[in-house]
Amino acid sequence: MQQETLNFFDKVFEVAKQIPYGRVTSYGAIAKYLGAARSARMVGYAMNGSHNKDVPAHRVVNRKGLLTGKHHFDGTNLMQQLLESEGVKVVENQIQDFDAIFWDPSKEL
């Protein structure tokens, strides 16, 4: 399937699948990479619908490193637990050393 024929959510999923283990990115960074800089909220909607699609949605957070999507994961702390299992430190829903582990698809892909 050609990239241009994929719908927006599929394009979001393809980018999210490339986020390296132990790294995070933001909804806005994915939107910007896809040429839709004002569509961070749509990226969030895509992440909410990504369950059962083998997409590491736990690696996508808001622009400040907050786990704003955590209520969409099963269990009270699953998003944080998944991140911590990859070595990401989270304190009070805030990723620590956010700038150091931030993955920017516009620079990395």
Image (cartoon, rainbow, N blue to C red):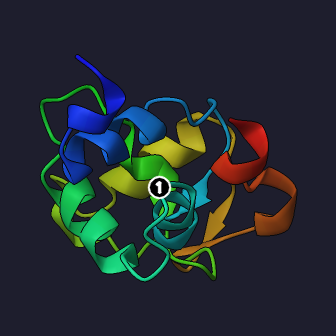
Residue at point 57%, 37% (across, down): 19
The residue carrying mark 1 is 34
Residue nearest the viewer, comparing 37 with 102: 37
Say whether residue 82 is left or right of residue 44: right
Residue 45 placement: quadrant: bottom left
Say whether residue 66 is left or right of residue 57: right
Residue 90 in view here = yes
Residue 1 placement: quadrant: top left
Residue 76 placement: quadrant: bottom left
Residue nearest the viewer, comparing 105 with 90: 105
Say whether residue 57 is left or right of residue 27: left
The answer to whether residue 71 is above or below residue 81 is below
Residue 15 place in picture, x, y as percent: 46, 39
Residue nearest the viewer, comparing 19 with 71: 19
The total of numbered circles placed on residues is 1
Tell which residue pokes out farthest to the right in this image: 100
Residue 42 place in picture, x, y as percent: 26, 71
Residue at point 41%, 50% (across, down): 58
Residue at point 44%, 41% (across, down): 16
- Give the amino acid at mark 1: Leu
The answer to whether residue 4 is above or below residue 12 is above
Residue 103 in view here = no
Residue 35 place in picture, x, y as percent: 49, 63
Residue 8 place in picture, x, y as percent: 24, 52
Disc 1 secondary structure class: loop
